[in-house]
Image (cartoon, rainbow, N blue to C red):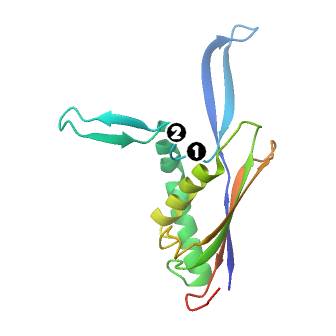
Amino acid sequence: MKTIKIYLAPTVQKVHKEILNSQGEPFVSSRYVTVPSKKNQQQAIVSKSTGKSFIKQSEQYVNWKKLTYPFFHNEANRIIQETGITRIIRAKMKIIFYFPDYLPRDLTNKSESIMDALVESKIIYDDKFQVSNKIWLEGYICKNRPRTEIYIHIIDPESTE
């Protein structure tokens, strides 16, 4: 069947700090915002109105979802145009993360963020093993061009593969 490639470039975020440089100007730096881990930095919150507790996602994850929502929906439309498939119901996947630095990162948590985005944008039907029971994860350093590459190999639903 067909293999689809989704290329997710990081966003560049300007970070303003109160520090002044040698000329007395505010120091402004930028950093790459790559795929965040979904589970890291979650907070347990108790609602003041109901008294019930719930888990709040990290600001980094919530912001990333807002930034990438249009991207993943555009990719879903592109896949429909290329393949005629409105939602992928069986696939093998490979997700390759290229990071801008050597900081330790958890690939499985980051892949959860990707899988949820693929399901929410209706690219894949679900993230259950019946849909994508083979998922490869790889991580590398690429300082000049950090990115995430997602390869979805569509499998015929009737195949024994």
Farthest bottom residue? Answer: 158
Taking the spot 49% from the left edge, 69% from the top edge, the residue there is 128
Disc 2 target residue: 60
Location of residue 54 in the rendering, given as x and y in whole percent from the top left corner: 32, 42
Asked whether disc 2 touches disc 1, contact meaning CB atoms under 8 Å apart, the reply is: yes
Quadrant housing the N terminus: bottom right
Left or right: 98, with 53 as reference point: right
Q: Label 1: few (<14), some or many (≥20) within 10 Å?
A: many
Mark identifier at residue 78: none
Among the 4 quarters of the image, the one containing residue 44: top left
Left or right: 4, with 85 as reference point: right
Residue type, mark 2 in image: Gln
Please determine whether, in this image, residue 25 is positioned above or below residue 141.
above
Mark identifier at residue 36: 1
Residue type, mark 1 in image: Pro
Q: Secondary structure at mark 1?
A: loop
Location of residue 41 in the rendering, given as x and y in whole percent from the top left corner: 50, 36
Left or right: 51, with 153 as reference point: left
Quadrant housing the C terminus: bottom right
